[in-house]
Structures are given as structure tokens and as C-alpha cells.
Image (cartoon, rainbow, N blue to C red):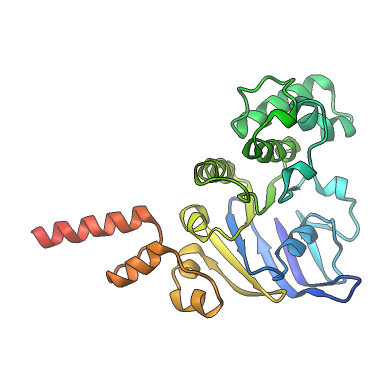
Amino acid sequence: MIAFENVSYTYPEGVRAIKGVTLTLRDGEFVGLIGHSGAGKTTLAKLAVGLLKPQEGRVLVDGLDTRRVPVSDLARHVGYVFQNPELMIFSRTIYDEVAFALRNLGVPEGEIRGRVVRALEQVDLGDKPLDTPPYALSFGEKHRLAIASVLVMEPRTIILDEPTTGLDYGRCLKLFEILKRLRDEGRAVVLITHDIDLLARYADRIVVLEGGRVVRDGPVREVLGDLEFLEGHGFIPTQVLLLARELGLDAITPSELAEKLCSRNIRSSS
């Protein structure tokens, strides 16, 4: 769906944020994009949606070269949710907020209503009256509203930049369940986050950025189960991984660890 071909990008002040990245993001994948501050994660996301244009190489979104296609056209294929949802929200009602992009495209109002309602239901805001002011929503609900305003365009890929910031664990779980459903519908979900625990439970694939380069790319178990790699690159391994290693087990999520402990106990008893 999205292909980076030897892409580099340097900001006007001279910071070379992305260095020769080649990467493919495919439909139906839940990809966790991790890296320390300044690794280039947000820059990579903005290149993927056309907000920034590569200075070397090229980015293809469903075959469209982002250097030659307007951002408004790319938005039909890939959506981007900012870290702070309040930067995206400006309308008087949640209906107007989600409908805004469709109205700009001249979509008939009858079709808009159906798509808005469907997008709000996808993010578990379907029980809110359509005239609810966005400022009356909680921070977590504002995140979901921002996601709905992207989903209404029906993009095949959605990229979220640190969406768990400011959310408690329960709201984080709810958000990840929503993203999992989107992945199950065949969309690609790309999530920039520092929350390795939740990525271990929900992601299919992990891409690690360091100094503007991809230093690791692989299945979630292969990357987040590599204790030596994580510690060697300054990541804090999950408590589940550390405990599993102490017990001589291969597990990266609580459910896996519980299952393997149960199996071990059954074998010991027999």
C-alpha cells in the first residue's frame, strides 16, 4: 500500500531526519513504529501522507507518487491522526467535524450522513448525539473523534502518532481494540508509540527507527521477544518478557505466559 524507496529528508535547519529508508507497509497489517525521540518517526509518518515530500527517493501511496499528487487526493488512500487530537478539531458539533472533509469534496449530504454515522460507530462514539460539541468530549473521546474524521474518508491505511498520550490504561486498551477491528477489516494500521506492552499484544509487525534509519523490521514476536536487541538499543523490555526469560519460557504477552505456565503445570502434574 505504501512504499518508501531509498527515501531521505532533511529539514531546512539542517537536521537530516530520514536517511535512505526503504520500507513497505501492506494492507491488513498492524504495524508498530518505535524509536527514541528524534529517531524520525513523525517525519516518516508525514512523508507517508504527503505532508512532507522526499528530497531523495520516492514514496508511493497505492501507486501514487507523493511528490506529484496533492495531499487532498492522498487523503482518500491514507489518513493521519496527530498526537494531539485538539489540533485537528475545530467544528461546532461532532457531526460537522467528521463531515468536514466530505463536504469539501462535494459529497451529497445524504451520503455524508450515512458515512459520518458509520465512522462514529467504528470508534464507539455512535451513542453520542450528533450535535454534541467536541469540547464536551473527554480527551480519549477526542482521540476517537479525530480517528473518525479520518475513517470517514475510507482510507486503506491509517497512521496514528502517539495516540495513547494522556490516556489511562483502560482507555488505551479500548483504543487498541478499535484499531484491531480496523486491521481485521483489511486496513493497514501504523501506530507510533512508546507502549511496547500493548504493541506486543496487538501488533503484527514492528519497525524500529534509530537516527533516521530502519534498524529492525520484523514480526512482533521476533522483534519484541529479542531481549538483547531491546536492551542494546535502549528499550525497556516488557515485564512479561523478563519474567518469561527467568522461567525459561517463550512468551511476550500475559495470555501467552499464563498459557505456557498452565501447560507446564499440567505436564508436571502428570
Instruction: Pinpoint residue 18: horizontal percent, then vertical percent.
Output: 77, 72
Instruction: Pinpoint residue 194: horizontal percent, then vertical percent.
Output: 58, 61
Please name whichever residue, 21 or 258, is drawn nearer the observer in this view of the structure: 258
Task: Answer left or right for 119 relative to 76.
Answer: left
Task: Answer left or right for 117 relative to 227.
Answer: right
Instruction: Pinpoint residue 174: horizontal percent, then vertical percent.
Output: 53, 40
Say above or below: 104 vs 56. above
Task: Answer left or right for 67 relative to 182.
Answer: right
Quadrant where the N terminus is found in the figure: bottom right
The residue lying at 67 percent from left, 41 percent from top is: 143
Task: Answer left or right for 12 relative to 133.
Answer: right
Answer with the quarter of the image where residue 186 lies: top right
Answer with the quarter of the image where residue 17 lies: bottom right
Please name whichever residue, 161 or 165, is drawn nearer the observer in this view of the structure: 165
Question: How many discs appear?
Answer: 0
The residue lying at 80 percent from left, 46 percent from top is: 75
Say above or below: 24 vs 255. below
The residue lying at 12 percent from left, 62 percent from top is: 268
Quadrant where the C terminus is found in the figure: bottom left
Instruction: Pinpoint residue 14: horizontal percent, then vertical percent.
Output: 88, 76
Q: Residue furthest left?
A: 270
The residue lying at 75 percent from left, 54 percent from top is: 62
